[in-house]
Image (tube, coloured by chain):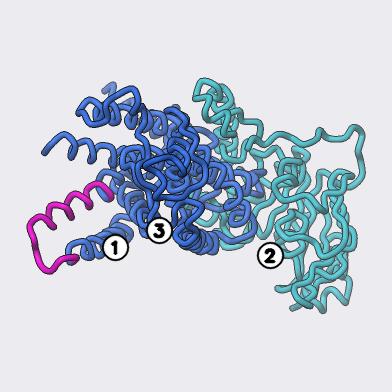
Chain colours: A blue, B cyan
């Protein structure tokens, strides 16, 4: 296993962990079935790309057309990616989350994802259409030689810092009284409303926070890959993230991380190894990967719907159970 | 969202707690509530009875804000709340329970109560991000308050159990306790005794009486007439979307029209 391969694996793991943590805030904790999640990651990637690239009229870049091209230094493209995800969440959330019932919200968001992909695919002057963007500058490429192992370590480090930051924010939200209110809304929206909670405000907030985190994950990914095109963010990508969360454990940040490592990273790796072994006709293994992911989701929903790491059972200090545990420990 | 009180109780407001003026609610030509006007007195338990399909639950939903009124006005403590969304009515002190169990199933019993607590510093995105130290005092105060309620309702031993695993009667109690955590001034109860074991019915009856003794105003829909007779100070009768009578149960039993419509069946 060479360094590039290992770095690739770690950075993908980081990006997927960030994405699944965001999806956990939206779906696992708040009950928003965001089937357009990948669009927010894509928005962050595109924003980071056009913020860091030179104008499309520049030499070497004239084979593509796109808006922007500001050549802004790191970390502005990453911050811009997060902002783009958050900003996109406002109009989408206002249209989808206010009036529709939650099952219709899911369908509306899935359709949003397909429409967004089709539009970007066909509107070439905006973000270079189906061919996508290439030669996206990497963070700090003017300061550090991007061809070295050291740059890979640096990129892994930057990704890890972002993972840590997102984990910290997600933990604060999930373990707070605010997180409890979000979980109550997920369980019974009408009852939460009757207790003075404003469900539209709660959902919009989580949609925007999740959008920002998704945008950041896209920015990290595009900085590493240096290319981004509509084919990288088709709606099934969202399903993989949902699978990760269902397998890992909805409502549990640790479960989200575990799921991210098991499903997107684990499945990709197994598939890659199987392809190398040349089993069956070409495309058999990638196609079987989807079958396996589908079976995995069904299997977990059937046999262990709470996932590998279920949502924590919150026992308060001074409760009969807590005292019993204390008693056993001292005895 | 932190649940701040939107306005303090206006000084010296007396008279009825809740006034409904000519409330209509139509569903595509069907008049579920058809011109109901009534007044709910302070500190009393008021009953709302009527045969199935009379429009009682629809009326309650309109008062709570879950369904908008097609026309008419609702005054709560003298202020027009007709256009306020449900959550704002709740923050003003108008709490409700539901006809069907509506517990937060995957939250513990104690958490169910804590969700309802207003004025919690940790119950906003900002408060959450500030961390535990920022809101832990509020949390401790509210846990104490919630445990006080659990004790009063005899459910202390269940505080760490998931609410979804409780019995029908216990879920009713959770809903009532949860509503009480809001410090409501008026409680709307939609069939609080339905599907509940007779022993728990007695319990709920006892608690409702003690809440009245504390000065809480209650408007309740109930089918069991002997319970209404024992609990309610006055009663309104609805049939086919209209109010057809009011008074004490004893006086209602003497009115022929009402007896025909409902009491005999």
Q: Chain of mark 2?
A: B
The crowd level at tag 1 (other Cα within 10 Å; few <14, some 14-19, many 20+) is some
Give the percent coordinates (x, y) of residue A187. Answer: 51, 51
- The mark found on residue A328 in the picture is none
Find numbered disc 2 in the image and state the secondary structure of the residue it sits on. loop
Q: CA distance from mark 3 to mark 1?
A: 27 Å
Please report the residue visible at 30 percent of the width from the left and 45 percent of the height from the top. A260
Q: Which residue is mark 2?
A: B224
Find numbered disc 3 in the image and state the secondary structure of the residue it sits on. helix
Q: Are marks 3 and 1 in contact (CB under 8 Å)?
A: no
Please report the residue visible at 68 percent of the width from the left and 58 percent of the height from the top. B190
| Residue nearer the viewer, A209 or B209 | A209
Q: Which residue is mark 1?
A: A294
- The mark found on residue A130 in the picture is 3
Q: Which residues are magenta?
A: A264-283
Question: Magenta stretch: dominant SS?
Answer: helix
Question: Is any atom of residue A41 visible in this view?
Answer: yes
| Residue nearer the viewer, A131 or B151 | A131
Q: Is residue A80 left or right of residue B175?
A: left
Q: Chain of mark 3?
A: A
Q: Chain of mark 1?
A: A
Q: Is residue B205 left or right of residue B257?
A: left
Q: Is residue A266 magenta?
A: yes
């Amino acid at each position: 296993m060479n360094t590039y391969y290992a770095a690739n694996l770690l950075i993908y793991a980081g990006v997927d962990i960030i994405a699944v943590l965001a999806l956990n805030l939206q779906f696992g904790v708040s009950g928003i079935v965001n089937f357009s999640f990948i669009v927010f990651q894509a928005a962050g990637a595109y924003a980071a790309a056009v913020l860091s690239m030179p104008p499309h009229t520049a030499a070497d870049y004239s084979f593509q057309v796109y808006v922007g091209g500001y050549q802004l230094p790191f970390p502005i493209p990453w911050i811009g990616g997060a902002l783009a995800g958050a900003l996109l969440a406002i109009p989408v959330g206002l249209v989808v989350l206010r009036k529709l019932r939650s099952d219709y919200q899911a369908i509306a968001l899935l359709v949003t994802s397909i429409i967004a992909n089709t539009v970007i695919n066909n509107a070439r002057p905006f973000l270079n259409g189906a061919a996508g963007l290439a030669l996206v500058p990497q963070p700090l490429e003017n300061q550090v030689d991007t061809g070295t192992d050291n740059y890979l370590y640096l990129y892994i480090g930057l990704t890890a810092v972002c993972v840590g930051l997102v984990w910290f924010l997600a933990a604060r939200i999930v373990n707070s009284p605010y997180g409890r209110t979000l979980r109550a809304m997920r369980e019974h929206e009408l009852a939460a409303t009757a207790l003075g909670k404003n469900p539209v405000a709660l959902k919009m907030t989580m949609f925007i926070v999740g959008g920002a985190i998704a945008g950041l994950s896209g920015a990290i990914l595009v900085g590493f890959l240096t290319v981004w095109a509509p084919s990288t963010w088709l709606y099934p990508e969202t399903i993989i993230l949902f699978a990760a969360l269902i397998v890992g454990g909805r409502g549990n940040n640790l479960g989200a991380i575990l799921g991210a490592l098991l499903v997107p990273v684990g499945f990709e790796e197994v598939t890659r190894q199987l392809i190398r072994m040349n089993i069956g006709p070409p495309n058999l293994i990638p196609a079987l990967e989807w079958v396996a992911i589908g079976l995995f989701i069904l299997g977990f929903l059937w046999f262990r719907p709470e996932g590998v790491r279920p949502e924590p059972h919150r026992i308060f200090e001074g409760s009969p159970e807590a005292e019993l545990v204390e008693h056993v420990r001292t005895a | 969202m932190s649940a701040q009180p939107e306005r303090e109780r206006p000084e010296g407001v007396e008279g009825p707690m809740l006034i409904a003026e000519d409330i209509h609610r139509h569903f595509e030509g069907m008049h579920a509530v058809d011109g109901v006007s009534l007044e709910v007195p302070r500190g009393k338990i008021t009953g709302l009875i009527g045969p199935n399909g009379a429009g009682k639950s629809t009326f309650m939903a309109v008062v709570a804000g879950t369904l908008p009124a097609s026309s008419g006005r609702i005054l709560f403590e003298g202020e027009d709340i007709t256009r306020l969304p449900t959550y704002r009515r709740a923050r003003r002190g108008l709490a409700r329970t539901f006809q069907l169990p509506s517990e937060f199933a995957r939250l513990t019993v104690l958490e169910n109560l804590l969700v309802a607590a207003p004025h919690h510093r940790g119950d906003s995105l900002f408060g959450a991000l500030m961390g535990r130290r920022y809101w832990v005092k509020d949390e401790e105060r509210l846990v104490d308050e919630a445990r006080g309620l659990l004790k009063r309702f005899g459910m202390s031993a269940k505080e760490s159990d998931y609410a979804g695993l409780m019995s029908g009667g216990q879920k009713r109690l959770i809903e009532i306790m949860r509503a009480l955590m809001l410090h409501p001034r008026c409680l709307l109860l939609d069939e609080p005794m339905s599907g509940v074991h007779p022993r728990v019915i007695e319990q709920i009856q006892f608690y409702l009486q003690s809440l009245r003794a504390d000065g809480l105003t209650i408007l309740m829909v109930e089918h069991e007439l002997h319970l209404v007779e024992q609990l309610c100070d006055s009663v309104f009768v609805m049939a086919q979307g209209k109010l057809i009578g009011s008074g004490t149960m004893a006086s209602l039993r003497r009115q022929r029209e009402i007896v025909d419509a409902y009491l005999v069946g």
